[in-house]
């Protein structure tokens, strides 16, 4: 078994590509010797092992019939290869044989535990928990910790995400990291386009293009639809945060040179509705990397979707199996049985007809960790072998291929949205909605 041995306490941030070049600041919290903090493109700052691998937890999550994940301080991910379904996704019963048992990995094959040495001691929210095999494992906030075999470089976060809306991870592994460096009363949420600044009550934060750190154009009637975010009396400027005195004794929070507002007319938590107003925009601590330059954004009846160079809607594939260890099945390294059954009745040629890959042009290549060009074996759906002559170069989001739908006839069609089990969430495809608050974003 792989153990993580550490010696010196150090916080290091290695910048990664963000859409606007800015990365999110974090709070310097106690960590065990040797661990560190990494900046990531989509999830802000995360804890990492001494070799830079992102650290994840597996919190409990309610399923249709019971719960998956780990109770506090209770590891449930071991090296046993499970062979049958758990029955958590009723009406499907337990005891159904899982596919590809000859190559099926165990939980720890995909999620190596972050082991602790025998003399490890708690540090801050970091604790040490015992495993049933007699080893010790690090935990944070009482949740046992793991790494993902999908992550190859420091700053990779391919195993899971922090999104509460449209998560990339039916298997429910969540990156763990230090708190975002924001004043009390604020929070940061992961959405498709970056790390969104909100209030602790999940109200989105907005800024106006014409404002500066020393002045704002929002007064009079403007205040009927925009509410300044007022700082408490004891608030002080800190880092990227400053204060604007709107009137004697009334100070407004300013972030990166822009006074901050909420939009009381928003209808959803972490909404982006206010950004539909001319001159107003959501505030991000960090933007997601830009889409590939050949892609387009196309309006639909439910909101804007990401589309390929022809304007045809792009879809993402989601898959999590119903085993007790809740392994994902949406990556090319995973079993392709579920995807092939769903998109073509097990026939890879029909799959490519109904759900063709978004192929990359000869000169195209990814310029971020989030968007990459990968080589796929069209017969199996796995990554192609080196020098494979019939391999297809396809675009991938978070290292997973993206698709268009053969049933879409024109720009703006999203007929493939929600295809698959549980409206596409558990095993199926969903359109790549640009905004999480679009109604279609729940499909």
Image: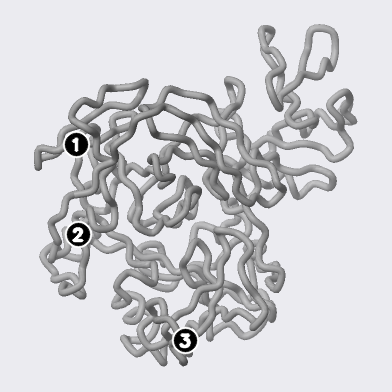
Q: Which mark is residue 74?
A: 1
Which SS class for mark 3?
Answer: loop
The picture places residue 16, in percent across and down from the top left corner, at 60, 48
In this view, the residue in front, 20 or 426, is 20
- Above or below 378: residue 282: above
Q: Which residue is mark 3?
A: 391
Q: Which mark is residue 303?
A: none
* Mark sitting earlier along the chain (2/3): 2
* Mark sitting earlier along the chain (2/1): 1
Q: Nearer the viewer, mark 1 or mark 3?
A: 3
Instruction: Please tell me which residue is depicted at 17% across the width and 63% down the height of the picture.
Output: 85
- Above or below 375: residue 196: above
Q: Which residue is mark 2?
A: 106
Instruction: Please tell me which residue is depicted at 71% across the width and 69% down the height of the picture.
Output: 293
The picture places residue 387, in percent across and down from the top left corner, at 45, 86
Instruction: Please tell me which residue is depicted at 33% across the width and 29% down the height of the picture.
Output: 141
The picture places residue 206, in percent across and down from the top left corner, at 72, 37
**Circles 2, 1 touching at the beta carbon (< 8 Å):** no
In this view, the residue in front, 18 or 227, is 18
- Above or below 38: residue 353: below
Instruction: Please tell me which residue is depicted at 60% across the width and 32% down the height of the picture.
Output: 25
Which SS class for mark 2?
Answer: loop
The picture places residue 103, in percent across and down from the top left corner, at 20, 72
Q: Quadrant of residue 412?
A: bottom right
Query: In 3D space, how far apart are the residues under numbered discs 2 and 1 (Cα atoms)?
Result: 18 Å
């Amino acid at each position: 078994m792989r153990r993580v041995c550490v010696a010196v306490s150090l916080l290091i941030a290695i910048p990664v590509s963000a859409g606007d070049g800015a990365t999110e600041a974090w709070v310097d919290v106690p960590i065990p010797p040797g661990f560190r903090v990494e900046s990531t493109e989509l999830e802000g700052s995360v804890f990492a092992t001494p070799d830079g691998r992102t650290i994840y937890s597996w919190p409990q999550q309610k399923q249709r019939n019971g719960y998956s994940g780990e109770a506090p301080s209770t590891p449930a991910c071991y090296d046993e290869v499970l062979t049958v379904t758990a029955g958590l996704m009723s009406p499907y019963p337990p005891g159904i044989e899982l596919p590809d048992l000859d190559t099926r990995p165990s939980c720890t094959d995909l999620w190596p535990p972050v082991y602790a040495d025998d003399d490890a001691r708690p540090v801050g929210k970091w604790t040490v928990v015992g495993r049933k095999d007699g080893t010790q494992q690090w935990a944070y906030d009482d949740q046992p910790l793991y790494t993902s075999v999908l992550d190859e470089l420091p700053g990779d976060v391919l195993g899971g995400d922090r999104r509460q809306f449209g998560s990339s991870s039916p298997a429910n592994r969540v990156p763990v990291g230090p708190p975002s460096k924001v004043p009390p009363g604020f929070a940061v949420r992961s959405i498709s386009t970056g790390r969104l600044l909100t209030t602790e009550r999940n109200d989105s934060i907005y800024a106006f293009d014409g404002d500066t750190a020393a002045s704002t154009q929002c007064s009079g009637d403007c205040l009927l639809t925009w509410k300044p975010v007022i700082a408490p009396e004891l608030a002080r400027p800190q880092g990227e945060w400053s204060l604007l005195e709107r009137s004697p004794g009334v100070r407004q929070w300013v972030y990166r040179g822009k006074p901050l507002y909420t939009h009381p007319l928003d209808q959803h938590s972490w909404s982006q509705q206010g950004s539909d107003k001319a001159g107003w925009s959501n505030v991000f601590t960090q933007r997601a990397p830009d889409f590939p330059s050949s892609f387009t954004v196309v309006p639909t009846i439910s909101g804007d979707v990401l589309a390929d160079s022809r304007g045809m809607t792009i879809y993402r594939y989601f898959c999590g199996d119903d085993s007790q260890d809740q392994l994902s099945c949406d990556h090319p390294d995973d079993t392709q049985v579920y995807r092939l059954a769903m998109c073509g009745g097990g026939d890879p040629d029909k799959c490519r007809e109904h759900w063709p890959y978004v192929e990359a042009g000869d000169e195209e290549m990814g310029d971020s960790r989030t968007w990459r060009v990968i080589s796929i074996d069209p017969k199996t759906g796995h990554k192609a072998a080196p020098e494979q002559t019939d391999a297809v170069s396809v675009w991938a989001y978070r290292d997973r291929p993206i698709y268009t739908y053969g049933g879409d006839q024109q720009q703006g069609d999203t007929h493939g949205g929600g295809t698959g089990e549980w409206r596409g969430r558990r095993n199926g495809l969903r359109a790549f909605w640009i905004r999480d608050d679009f109604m279609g974003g729940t499909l």
